[in-house]
Amino acid sequence: MRRAEIRSEFDAIVAFAGVERFLDTPVKRYSSGMYVRLAFAVAAHLRSEILLIDEVLAVGDIEFQRRCLGKMRDVARSGRTVLFVSHHLQSVSTLCHRLLVLEGGQLVHDGEVHAGLTRYLSGFERGNKSSVQESKRPGSGELRVSRAASVREFYECAEPKAVRFLIEQRSQFDGRFYVSVHLVDPMGTVVAQCDSRLLGEWFDAGQNLELEFSFNTPWLKPGTYRVDVYLCAAGFIDQCEHACSVEVLPLLPYPATAGSEAMDAGLVLADFNFCRVPRASEEPSYAPDRDALGGANPSAL
């Protein structure tokens, strides 16, 4: 950028990165998150024909991520090319018009976005199933999830669902731990995080501990959902991703049917209702009951 261009964009770059208070701080003292935010802000305000973005959504808060997505849309609409590298599938599906999937360094898909996401997730499923082996899972390893399964093979959308899993002690563990279960939809989005701390539940280690995790809401859309189980204390003890799956049948909990566009947009199904509120002219008239008023003289009311 020419010096004049830098001056004209300087305030916008600083405001976008949110580093107004740190302008006098050497960049070498910035945190990694601040550095990436500033780098994205600079790149996004350049006049280059191609904008290459690599996992920028991995840093920053929700507000910064929203600004990033909005800026990338603006750049793309201006006729420039945005090459967006990310594992954040929700953002990929809403931002991109063409998708390339790499697997083992090889291009395995180049084309339509939805088909590419399906191809990516199929490879992810294979990788996750092999990584369930205890020796390959992250965590300190004193406790391990050795077995997990859905209580039933299939569930309807609105009925309660349950998963049972066995926790075994592999080495000496003193203290208590908590359990966090993630429900992950077919697009790889975490639909719900169910943390035992929210219920005040902590567990003591033992040779064998079998737990049943159940939930009533949200109503899950039809499909196969991944269940990830995390055992934690001061840090991760076991990260058992793809511990098991929950299969939801296409039996909707609503009294009427509609096309797919009636529920495509949401992540889950809702228990909702519409109620017609009468207008003022339709409200029933009300006349005071004289007996209820103690026989008072109307003229004195």
Image: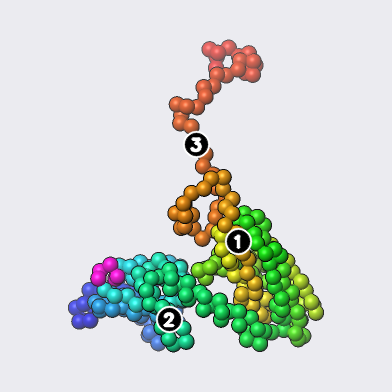
Residue that mark 3 sits on: 276
Report, in whole angstroms, how far the alpha carbon at label 2 lies from the one at label 3.
52 Å
Residue 126 in the figure: left or right of residue 5? right
Residue 267 numbered mark, or none? none
Q: Nearer the viewer, residue 16 or 53?
A: 53
Name the kind of residue labelled 1 in the image: Val
Q: Nearer the viewer, mark 2 or mark 3?
A: 2
Q: Tell whether position 265 is magenta.
A: no
Residue 206 in the figure: left or right of residue 38? right
Q: Residue at x 55, y 59 (%)?
A: 221
Residue that mark 2 sits on: 108
Q: Is residue 60 visible?
A: no
Q: Nearer the viewer, mark 3 or mark 1?
A: 1
Q: Magenta segment, which residues?
A: 75-79
Q: Secondary structure at mark 1?
A: strand
Q: How is the image coloured?
A: rainbow
Q: Quadrant of the C terminus?
A: top right
* Residue 84, quarter of picture: bottom left
Q: Position of residue 169 (x, y in %)?
A: 76, 81
Report, in whole angstroms, how far the alpha carbon at label 3 lies from the one at label 1.
32 Å
Mark 1 or mark 3, which is nearer the start of the sequence? 1
* Residue 85, quarter of picture: bottom left
Q: Is residue 260 visible?
A: yes
Residue 139 in the figure: left or right of residue 19? right
Q: Position of residue 258 (x, y in %)?
A: 48, 49
Q: Residue at x 74, y 76 (%)?
A: 167
Report, in whole angstroms, how far the alpha carbon at label 1 lies from the one at label 2.
29 Å
